[in-house]
Image (cartoon, rainbow, N blue to C red):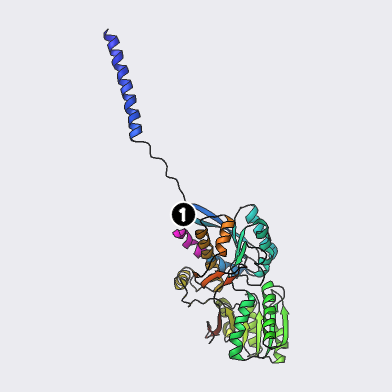
């Protein structure tokens, strides 16, 4: 009997302990792992990091990276960006390869780039075919976005820039006999020269000569000597960044003193040309001294990191990331169609470039400026 009572007591204790354990588990459940809701959205980046335009590509990448750090600092809530960078080797074929790789292998839905109009003209059809968003920070030739409602770009197009720039400079300088030089191997330079010819015809300005050259050329003396003999009132140059300083320096060496009006001249090229850049005029959309929203903070941040002021290529690239981020925030989605629609609806968005909108073709709308080099610095043309 004693043994039986002892065994019953042990059984009651075991059942009691089990019940207490179950009650404890119900009252104090194990804390579940907290789900990380943040996700990095992969953004393709196609830039000329080697080749003819490598110096411009590196500056653009700095602008993109600075904006990326700001976006990932909480401006989109839980959504972060992650760049997958591809080098287009400064060639249209390289841009096509980069787009195909980013779309087919990395499965990106958005690509920032390419930089040049030639590369953009070649690569944008790939974005159209795959219905991927593509935004060029710097390609300015006309007609590049008309191929698809999935493609956009940040710079003002050549026809807009030239038309407004000619109005301002012709009124003050009064030139009636001009000459032009342009890079016949580059889509932007060729299109800009065509836009110039159209503007000259509209104002009955005589074009004395149109001198072509090619990307990579370093000797422009023959073209400049022929132009000098015609004694024009002004000389218009449509070129990519590497060629602009050489043209100005060689013109100065020949003693050409008439105004040079140069495409998208930046502080980098002004420094490279030195004293030969003095008095050069350009049509452009941004200055470090602009009081546009956030511009001074942008300039200060960039200067603190890189030890020099940004140029317009940096600013346009920086703005491109913030414009994309605004569209994604408004779309509340990372799907290409939703982003496309949100980009198309960007209207008077505050950027370092000023109030920014896209027109029906996906081209930029904002104010441009005419600048002149005075004392080695780009300043408003007045």
The secondary structure making up most of the magenta span is: helix
Is any part of residue 380 visible from this angle? yes
**Does 137 sit left or right of 9 as displayed?**
right
The N terminus, quarter of image: top left
Q: Secondary structure at mark 1?
A: loop
At horizontal 47% and vertical 51% (from top left) the residue drawn is 38
Is any part of residue 94 visible from this angle? no
Q: Position of residue 79 (x, y in %)?
A: 49, 55
Q: Position of residue 138 (x, y in %)?
A: 60, 70
**Which of 319/243 is in front?**
319
Q: Is residue 92 magenta?
A: no
Which image quarter: residue 146? bottom right
Q: Position of residue 118 (x, y in %)?
A: 68, 69
Which image quarter: residue 189? bottom right
Residue numbers of the magenta segment: 65-77
**Which of 54/201 is in front?**
201
At horizontal 70% and vertical 63% (from top left) the residue drawn is 93
The total of numbered circles placed on residues is: 1
**Does 178 sit left or right of 301 as displayed?**
right
Name the residue carrying label 1. 78
Q: Is residue 134 above or below residue 23?
A: below
**Which of 277/92 is in front?**
92
The 10 Å Cα crowd at callout 1, few under 14, some 14 to 19, many 20 or more, is: few
**Does 298 sit left or right of 160 as displayed?**
left
């Amino acid at each position: 009997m004693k043994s039986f009572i002892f065994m019953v007591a042990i059984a009651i204790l075991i059942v009691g302990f089990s019940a207490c354990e179950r009650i404890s588990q119900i009252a104090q459940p194990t804390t579940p792992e907290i789900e990380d809701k943040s996700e990095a959205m992969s953004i393709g980046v196609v830039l000329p990091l080697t080749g003819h335009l490598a110096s411009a590509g590196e500056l653009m990448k700095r602008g993109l990276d600075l904006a990326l750090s700001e976006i990932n600092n909480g401006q989109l809530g839980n959504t972060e960006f992650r760049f997958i960078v591809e080098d287009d080797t400064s060639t249209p074929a390289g841009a096509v390869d980069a787009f195909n790789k980013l779309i087919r292998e990395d499965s990106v839905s958005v690509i920032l780039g390419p930089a040049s109009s030639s590369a953009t003209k070649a690569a944008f059809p790939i974005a159209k075919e795959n219905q991927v968003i593509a935004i060029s920070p710097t390609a300015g030739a006309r007609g590049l976005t008309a191929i698809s409602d999935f493609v956009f770009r940040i710079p003002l197009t050549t026809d807009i820039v030239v038309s407004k720039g000619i109005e301002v400079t012709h009124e003050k300088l009064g030139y009636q006999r001009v000459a032009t030089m342009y890079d016949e191997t580059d889509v932007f330079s060729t299109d800009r020269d065509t836009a110039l010819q159209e503007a000259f015809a509209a104002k009955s300005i005589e074009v004395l000569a149109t001198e072509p050259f090619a990307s990579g050329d370093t000797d422009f003396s023959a073209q400049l000597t022929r132009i000098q003999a015609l004694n024009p009132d002004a000389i218009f140059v449509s070129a990519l960044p590497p060629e602009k300083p050489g043209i100005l320096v060689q013109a100065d060496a020949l003693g050409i003193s008439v105004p040079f009006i140069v495409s998208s001249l930046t502080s980098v090229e002004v420094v490279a040309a030195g004293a030969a850049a003095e008095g050069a005029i350009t049509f452009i959309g941004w200055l470090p001294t602009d009081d546009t929203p956030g511009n001074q903070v942008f300039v200060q941040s960039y200067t603190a990191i890189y030890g020099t002021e940004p140029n317009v290529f940096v600013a346009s690239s920086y703005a491109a990331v913030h414009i994309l981020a605004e569209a994604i925030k408004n779309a509340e989605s990372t799907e290409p169609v939703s982003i496309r629609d949100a980009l198309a609806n960007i209207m008077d968005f505050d950027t370092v470039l000023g109030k920014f909108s896209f027109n029906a073709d996906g081209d930029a709308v904002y104010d441009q400026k005419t600048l002149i080099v005075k004392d080695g610095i780009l300043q408003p043309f007045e």
